[in-house]
Image (tube, coloured by chain):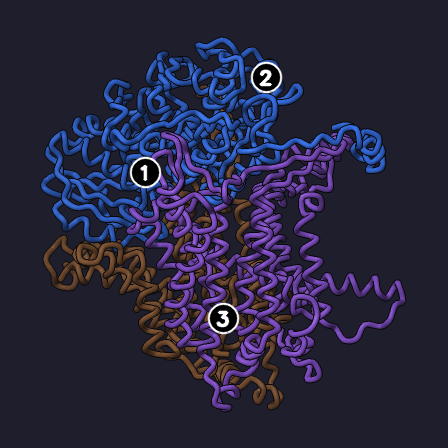
Chain colours: A blue, B purple, C brown
Amino acid sequence: MTKSNFTRRGVLKAGAAAGAALATPTIFTGAVWAGAHTGFTNAPQGDTVTLGFNVPQSGPYADEGADQLRAYQLAVEHLNGEGDGGMINTFTSKTLDGTGIMGKKVQFVTGDTQTKSDAARASARSMIEKDGAIMITGGSSSGVAVAVQALCQEAGVIFMAGLTHSNDTTGKDRKANGFRHFFNSYMSGAALAPVLAKAYGTDRKAYHLTADYNWGYTTEQAVRESTEAMGWETVNSVLTPLTQTDFSSYIAPVLNSGADVLVLNHYGGNMVNSLTNAVQFGLRAAEANGKNFEIVVPLYSELMARGAGANIKGILGSQNWDWKLENQAGAKYYGTNAFVQSFGTKFGFPPSQAAHTVYVQTLLYADAVNRAGSFNPCAVAEALAGFEFDGMGNGPTLYRADDHQCFKDVVVVRGKENPENEFDLVEIVEVTPVEQVTYAPDHPQMGGAEASLGACNPGA
Amino acid sequence: MTEQATNTPIAKPKAPPSIVASTGFLGLNRKDATLLALVVVLTMLAPFILNPFPEGSGMAQFNAGYPDLMQRFVIFGIFAIGFNILFGLTGYLSFGHAAFLGVGSYAAIWMMKLVTLNIIPAIILSIIFAGLFALLVGFICLRRSGIYFSILTLAFAQMSYALAYSVLTPITGGETGLQIKATDRPILSGLEPGEIGRANFFGIDMRTSYELSLGDWLFTFNAGYYIAAVVMLLSFYLSIRIFRSPFGMMLRAVKSNQQRMSYTGLNSKPYTLAAFVISGMYAGLAGGLMVAMDTQVGPERMFWTASGEVVLMAILGGVGTLIGPVLGAGMIKYMENIISKINETILHQWFAFLPDGLEDFVVSMIYPFIGKGWHLTLGIVFMLVVIFLPGGLVEGGQKIAGLFRRKAKTDDTPSKTPAE
Amino acid sequence: MEAIILQILNGLDKGSAYALIALGLTLIFGTLGVVNFAHGALFMIGAFCAVTLQRLLGLSHQIVDETRKDFLGNPLKIDVPYMHEWFGPEIGQSIIEWSVPLAILFSIPIMAFIGIAMERGLVKHFYKRPHADQILVTFGLAIVLQEIIKYFYGANPIPTPAPPAFTGSFDFGALVGFDANTIIYPYWRLIYFSFSMIVIAGVFAFLQFTTFGMVVRAGMADRETVGLLGINIDKRFTIMFAIAACVAGLAGVMYAPINSPNYHMGMDFLVLSFVVVVVGGMGSLPGAVLAGFLLGIVESFASMTQILDIFPGINQIIIYLIAIIILLTRPRGLMGRKGVMEE
């Protein structure tokens, strides 16, 4: 910031001098967001480029949003050549050299999605219209991701999704301008099923409690189809309201239903409460059909595990990434330690998977711009589509061109029996290889043949 | 509020509303005409007024003159004006008004997905649907009064929200809501294959903007905003006419003493029901406009917090005053969109001129109130306003105006009249 | 049959929370005539009293263990709670584990203080103001309170387990003569129910059998006359506010092990508790309790698979549907008094 801005008069003087001469009206027809001469929205002017970090800062996912913001801050530092460089050093593409993106210094604006699609779009629009953001990223729920992705498609900027697990984001609601690094419901189901079969046998009767909204539906469907394919039987499936806080009336009948596995297709506060209630009702200690009763939580997160406390012990679930991955599952997942090292040094605790995915997304975007040699969203999208990379902590990864979904190994984890500290809550059980979780782009769970990316929109 | 109502010119016997209404500009008395003119000027010049700080300066963070927020100001203004017709005049506190906004939004987006991308039919449909839904809800809820009425409306809104989020997913899109997709082919649109439809007003895209840069300043004149602003001015004008009409008078009578009214043999229910439906149609109009400006609907729009928000807008601005709810709406939306975007980095930029230790101290003192702490600031503002300005922001405006008048030593203004 | 009994138990349990919050709301409303939107926040603060005590008891200092490494490769720092040092690891640990029951004692002075401060500092000035103003100011206060909690404790739920002796569940069915293993119920939920019955009974007994309660009841019925008799009703009303805050706080403390507390749990309960109060009838304490249990039980039944198969999604709306039906058939709720908040 320059000094002159502090004295209002100075600015006024400057304005008056330049005023008449610089009055350059420009008329945009079609789309306001289109830059006049560049052919795409918000083409960076000068020597900086602005990214928009749109994460939940209020509401139940505020802590997850805070962790994402930390990772973004770190990514921006690394892109601008500050800090130790983190995963830039391990990333297989070598275009990032600490000079920003295409030589322009990276700046960022932040906003609050409130985990509401209206608020998230308002925040994203203000970033695009007011702050001139060239890319929007972040978020902690699929409703928000789909809404903001649609907005970015209309506005002609790139959307790099944050934590969104519903199939729809890259399934029936996929968009040419939108990209997702995080895994999805289908992959959770496909990754969990073989591990479940190994751990609990193929002769099991499952009872599903499912959050009554899109993400719940796709997760239940994914887990159901892949476990039934292995011989499990689904005894019952009950939808629970999103606003439910006490799940006792849904948990109580489970034990007498003939089921011996309870699958909780819940996320966030719902999951913390339903799992806590299930353990209260003695399901972990119970026996059914002559076997130990088991509970499965398809989508895990570190924050949820922390919220559930001791109740998480021994419960199987899946994750996109875990900070212990490289140490425990091998050097294939290199990059992990580099990221954990720089995040841990800066903030004093290990990063969550939400932080990891947004950090990777930011680097991937920056690299794609460099490789494309342009900020034009269509050029960037082309550079990202079909891009194969490694060294970002997940092993070899493909950004598939058909649906803009990343394909990589999925981590299956279990709540740790004796955690050493509050960040060491899960242990890695197995890493399911990418081949097992890959599906056809027109898979019925992904919107079938009708789903299409549409055309890329540069905004002009 | 009751005092204010009795203080207004129409309540004075010497100026019966029918006479006032028939004189003056557009059927308004001089004071109302002045107020309307003021609002017209403010809304038309909003791109200038809301962007007082030059681009690139530290204060530019506080600029609100970008299309999205300007659109939200006027749309929520309409919502609050409509709410005020019910609450300000009749005293019936609806805690479920967001349901009508939501119903209007869903109606509008389906019109755009299926029939035409022109916003006018979509908005008309949203008003009709919201009106019908309000008729149904109002007919049932108005059998009770006071808090029982409030809870009944709340119950309907919460049921609408819960169903839209879950069971009605095929119609509402559930959690992910509805957007216009590449596969949507409205029958009257003539889109090319693969083209994603955009809301327009007889061919004018809502996002069309004209940008004027004067020196360091950049002003954006957005088509969508001006369309919404004109609609808001019409709604505002209509609400003045309703306030000043015999019908409005009847509604005030309902508020001040319903019992006495029924003793005189008048059945108040048709009047309150009419007010409820009109107010619901305003909400539907706001919902339709929201879709027109940003083609997307999500069920959170109907959650009780959204209903509560419009109540707060009305009270914050000044219940029963004409302009108050609009001010309240502007205030809440401004804080939601501007304060929430200030982050620690920006604070450090602002105070970079201070010595390091002092800078960190100042930043750490302000930090809890901005960015993710914007709710805290909002809560404090609510409390301060209601403690020190019982009549809402309008009263604050009057106090300031009063100070100026005293300074200028002009004629003593008569009694404390609200700026209706 | 077993399934129905299970759901009745669940309903009573949920109803306990509703009833306790609604009871406090009605006390404040009935005595002071104030619509308190911050009441949910008081419930939340109660739960965070338990969290705070758990943290206080768990306060520890760090010792560095050179033989082990943390995730960054630095020497591991181990937290040693003072309780372990003072009382030995075993007794110290069990003191920490008993933090929730201990928090009952811990929370009463805190909640009473918050209640008095709220009444004297803020609510007092709003007795004569319109209900709309009361709503705005208490809602603003609720936001401020929950943001303060969020600032210190974060947005994530914080696990606050019950003492190990009460964490499990037991065969309730076998106790009352059903087949073994048909009705398994958690200890803590039965404790919660019993506890709330004691609190409710205590409040009623207090109002019914003490002079203080008699005056307050008289004040509820006709404040002016009581004032004219030369009784300082204001002071008593302050105490009633403190009692209501304590009831909400205790409900929160005991609720902490059932669901991990988070900063917005008060808002989650706020709307529901207003529905309960109104369905019970404004100004009626027995009505509030009755409606609390009624809605709890109805909600539990609506979540049964057999019912959901017939009416899909009924669990989403049942509370509101019942509220509408009751308010349409009984104009003032179950036991409401005439003329209260009907203007």
Query: Are dots 1 and 3 on a single chain?
Result: no
* Viewer-nearest of discs 2 and 1: 2
Q: Which chain contains the residue that carries disc 2?
A: A
> Which of the labelled discs sits on residue A132, or is there none?
none
In this figure, which residue is indicated by the disc labeled 1? A312
> Which of the labelled discs sits on residue B275, or is there none?
3
**Element under label 3?**
helix
**Amino acid type of the residue tagged 3 in the rendering:** Ala
Query: Are dots 2 and 1 on a single chain?
Result: yes
Q: Which chain contains the residue that carries disc 3?
A: B
**Element under label 2?**
loop
In this figure, which residue is indicated by the disc labeled 2? A100
Estimate the x, y position of residue C118 in percent, counting from the top left: 59, 64
Estimate the x, y position of residue B373 in percent, counting from the top left: 58, 45
Residue B81 vertical placement versus A417 (above, below):
below
**Amino acid type of the residue tagged 1 in the rendering:** Ile
Query: Are dots 2 and 3 on a single chain?
Result: no
